[in-house]
Amino acid sequence: MSDLLIGFAGIGLAVFLILARIPIAVALTSVSFVGLFILIGERGAFGVLSAVVYDFIAKWTLSSIPMFLLMGFVCFHAGLTRGLFNLCRVLFVRLPGGLAITAVVGSAGFATVTGSSVACAAAMGRIAVPEMLRAGYKPELATGSIAAAGTVGALIPPSILLIIFGTFTQTPVSLLFLGGIGAGLLTALSYIVVILIRVKLNPSLAPRSMEKIQSGARTQAFKEVWPTLLLICIVFGGLFSGVFTATEAGAVGALASFGVAALNRTLSWRVAWNAIRETTYTTATIFVITIGANLLTRFLSISDVAGVLSEFVISFGAEPWILAIGLTVLFVLLGLILEPMGALLLTLPVILPVMVASDASMIWYGVLIVKLLEVGMITPPVGLNVFVVKSVVGDRVSTSAIFRGIWWFLIIDFVVVGLMIAFPGLVLAIPNLVGS
């Protein structure tokens, strides 16, 4: 059996095991190790295994992952997100679908202190869904808007998926963060437009609020949001002014989140313990899966699958936009059956040589891929954000109702993806401006 055939057989077996619900880390690591064992023998396979684990863990950039996660979990458990929601509520409640718009804007704001769409959906779901249901909003709009808005959490920095992509592809994380800002804001704006259009067409979806905002309500709301604003200013002010790197920003943000929560008098031993426990669990999960993906990269390189795929793309002279359409189809299909981290780390070893061969910006590719992965977060039947919202609302809203509520948002997501492909400047404008 040729090395190339072994490589492609390994890819097929890995996909089969993941579809069979074998843990992603186990599937990637076992297939890669067995493939290496066949190709280069026992000593070579164990040598590659030990080298990959050390080389990956020793990357300084990855230390930002647990730090940004810790910052987000501290903010979540210390209740720093409620002030952000209250401010948005005061500003937007009188608009058609104002509470749903508030949830979208609040999610975009919370995204700046977390890197997870799941965290955004869970945090805003606990706060916003009960308010919308009490205000007479249709359950489909109330829950669908939260599930969709949560996806902004993986685009606006700090994004865990962008950190993983940057580390894997040797792309500067700070520039990926800048690219993610444009895509994240465009996504949030498109969701707001969808809500406005839907409520205009069908006012019964969201009864117009007649609530009168008291003269001091806005001032009080701004006072409540200061912890989050202070944390954002510390982390991103220092990051984008060059005071510290993206890696250092994670550590600064984690430390600052404890300080801000203490100043806000919402820090307790329980808050700290829950944040540290969830950070440890999530970090371990991410690292184990990513080590498996790195091992798969070595396996595909040694079997020459990566080289064959690169030559295939070069021979056709594929334009970046054609490859982008192909990636769109690939990740939409994967989003039907896999969660984002698994889909990213399963495919990166295969598609990275192809993206490099197309000679387009890796920043553009990275942000586009993360956007596509987040579309999968609300795509049935997996739709992880849908199930997160379901866990928050309990029996008040059925899972099928939540899925019905996300269809309009899915449609506008594909419009946004089309705009990102047709106009790469939407992603690259800010990175080019800063880099020039």
Image (cartoon, rainbow, N blue to C red):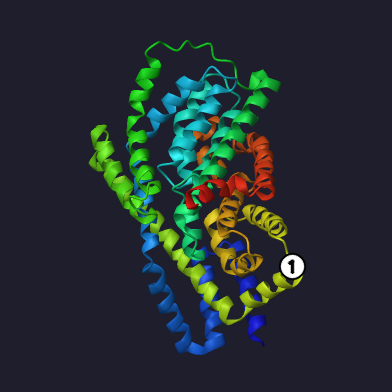
Figure quadrant of residue 232: top left
Q: Position of residue 150 (x, y in %)?
A: 52, 40
220 displayed left or right of 202: left
Q: Residues within 10 Å of mark 1 (few under 14, many from 20)?
A: few
417 displayed left or right of 283: right
What is the count of numbered marks? 1
Which residue occupies 65% across, 31% down?
Answer: 194
Amino acid type assigned to the residue bearing label 1 in the image: Gly
Quickly name the residue at label 1: 317
The quadrant of the rendering that contains the N terminus is bottom right
Q: Position of residue 298 (x, y in %)?
A: 52, 76
- Above or below — where is 131 with respect to 259? above
Figure quadrant of residue 361: bottom right
Q: Tag 1, which secondary structure?
A: loop
Q: Position of residue 303 (x, y in %)?
A: 60, 81
Residue 281 in view in this figure: no
- Above or below — where is 380 with respect to 6? above
Outermost residue toward the front?
436
- Taking depth in this image into account, of 49 and 175 the one nearest to the observer is 175
Q: Position of residue 302 (x, y in %)?
A: 56, 81
Which residue occupies 36% across, 18% down?
Answer: 219
Which residue occupies 63% across, 77% down?
Answer: 307
Which residue occupies 66% across, 41% down?
Answer: 410
Residue 99 in view in this figure: yes
